[in-house]
């Protein structure tokens, strides 16, 4: 007999399928209860729209697909971390500043201190996650309402990290943009995990049989799948499994749903939230490492406003600002919508200023839709 059966005092073997004590949940209600429903539906609509208006623009050619996939992946990586943190009832406004900070922690040791690139990357991850730990510890240890603390503390770290990155880069190098990382990264074993490509042989074969376009020398116009896309899919898959199939995932939901009740049944809510702040910093560093090794340079102002885009992607994916509800898969599709629309606007020749309007409209629709679905499912129960 299961725990739930013991609590109810009823053996499930004695309940007939038609017993009124067995709650029947319709397929529609099960579908509506999925947090990612809105983002999946939105992604389908966005693809359908641009397939109609931008099919001949090159948006769905091999290089076009890679372009909007890379844009989606960059946002998707930090949206995964933001989504898990929001489900736990917190959010971090310092994600964007962390990107610039971590990028400089890779570039300065590699270019100016003659560190191997792999050591600089590890240094950046350790430093960023240490900041994430401090951020989370301050939030957890204060006695103020969680939402207010997250807002104030993360906003403070947004300015601290951005200012520290600029001040540190000028003090140490007299520059805010550091180049030359790409040359130093050639042949580095760890750099290839962030700035390389996979499937090179496969894309060469596709070009040889004429399935994708080639340059004049016969090389494929798309040489492989960038590692930033691989990281996006990998983080989404792993985090979705952890959230839905492990005890730690249950702790995340419990911490955001009702932290006091979770503490009373033994959930280490403080430790869970600190770990998620550290993981958010980890995701920001992955983003930074991929950018630094892709462009061969770091800039102090990189990641500007990315914290808001990550939160919006998570909200579009079904996450609630109040915590306890959300989906990593939803955040994945939320980021995909961003990438497709941002590049779709470019391919269709529409003024890029309209993209910000789209972000605001999508956020408003997502909040209203999530609230409607939440009430619908609650009333159905």
Image (tube, grey):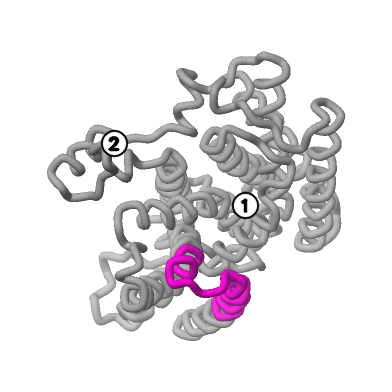
The magenta segment? 342-367
Along the line of sight, the residue nearer the viewer: 229 or 68? 68
Q: Is residue 299 left or right of residue 138?
A: left
Q: Quadrant of residue 14?
A: bottom left
Q: What residue occupies the far left of the structure in this picture?
A: 209
Q: Position of residue 250 (x, y in %)?
A: 52, 52
Q: Which residue has dot 2 on it? A: 199
Q: Is residue 196 magenta?
A: no
Asked if 349 appears above or below 232 in the picture, the reply is below
- The numbered mark, 2 or 1, whose residue comes first in the sequence reads 2
Asked if 348 appears above or below 93 in the picture, the reply is below
Predominant secondary structure in magenta? helix
Identify which residue is drawn at 84% across, 33% down.
170
The 10 Å Cα crowd at callout 1, few under 14, some 14 to 19, many 20 or more, is: few
Along the line of sight, the residue nearer the viewer: 8 or 275? 275
Q: Which residue has dot 1 on it? A: 265
Q: Is residue 366 magenta?
A: yes
Q: Position of residue 121 (x, y in %)?
A: 60, 26
Q: Position of residue 317 (x, y in %)?
A: 50, 66
Q: Quadrant of residue 196?
A: top left
């Amino acid at each position: 007999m299961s725990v739930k059966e013991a609590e109810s005092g009823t053996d499930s073997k004695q309940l007939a399928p038609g017993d009124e004590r067995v709650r029947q949940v319709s397929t529609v209600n099960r579908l509506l209860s999925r947090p990612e429903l809105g983002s999946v539906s939105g992604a389908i609509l966005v693809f359908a729209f641009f397939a109609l208006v931008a099919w001949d623009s090159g948006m769905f050619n091999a290089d076009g697909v890679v372009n909007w996939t890379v844009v989606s992946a960059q946002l998707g990586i930090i949206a995964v971390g933001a989504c898990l943190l929001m489900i736990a009832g917190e959010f971090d406004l310092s994600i964007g500043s962390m990107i610039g900070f971590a990028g400089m922690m890779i570039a300065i040791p590699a270019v100016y201190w003659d560190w191997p690139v792999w050591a600089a990357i590890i240094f950046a991850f350790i430093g960023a996650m240490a900041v994430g730990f401090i951020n989370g510890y301050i939030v957890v240890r204060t006695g103020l309402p969680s939402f207010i603390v997250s807002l104030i503390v993360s906003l403070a770290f947004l300015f601290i990290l951005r200012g520290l990155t600029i001040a540190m880069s000028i003090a140490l190098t007299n520059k805010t943009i550091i180049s030359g990382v790409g040359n130093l990264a050639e042949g580095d074993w760890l750099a290839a995990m962030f700035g390389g490509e996979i499937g090179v042989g496969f894309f060469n074969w596709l070009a040889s049989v004429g399935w994708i376009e080639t340059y004049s020398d016969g090389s494929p116009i798309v040489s492989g799948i960038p590692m930033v896309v691989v990281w996006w899919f990998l983080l989404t898959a792993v985090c979705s499994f952890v959230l839905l199939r492990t005890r730690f995932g249950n702790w995340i939901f419990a911490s955001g749903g009702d932290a006091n009740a979770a503490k009373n049944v033994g959930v280490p809510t403080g430790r869970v939230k600190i770990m998620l702040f550290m993981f958010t910093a980890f995701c920001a560093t992955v983003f930074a490492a991929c950018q630094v090794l892709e462009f061969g340079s770091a800039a102090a102002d990189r990641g500007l406003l990315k914290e808001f885009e990550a939160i919006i992607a998570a909200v579009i994916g079904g996450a609630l600002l109040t915590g306890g509800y959300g989906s990593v898969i939803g955040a994945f599709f939320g980021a995909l919508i961003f990438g497709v629309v941002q590049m779709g606007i470019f391919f269709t020749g529409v003024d890029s200023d309209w993209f910000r309007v789209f972000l605001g409209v999508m956020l408003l629709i997502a909040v209203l839709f999530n609230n409607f679905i939440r009430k619908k499912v609650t009333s159905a129960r």
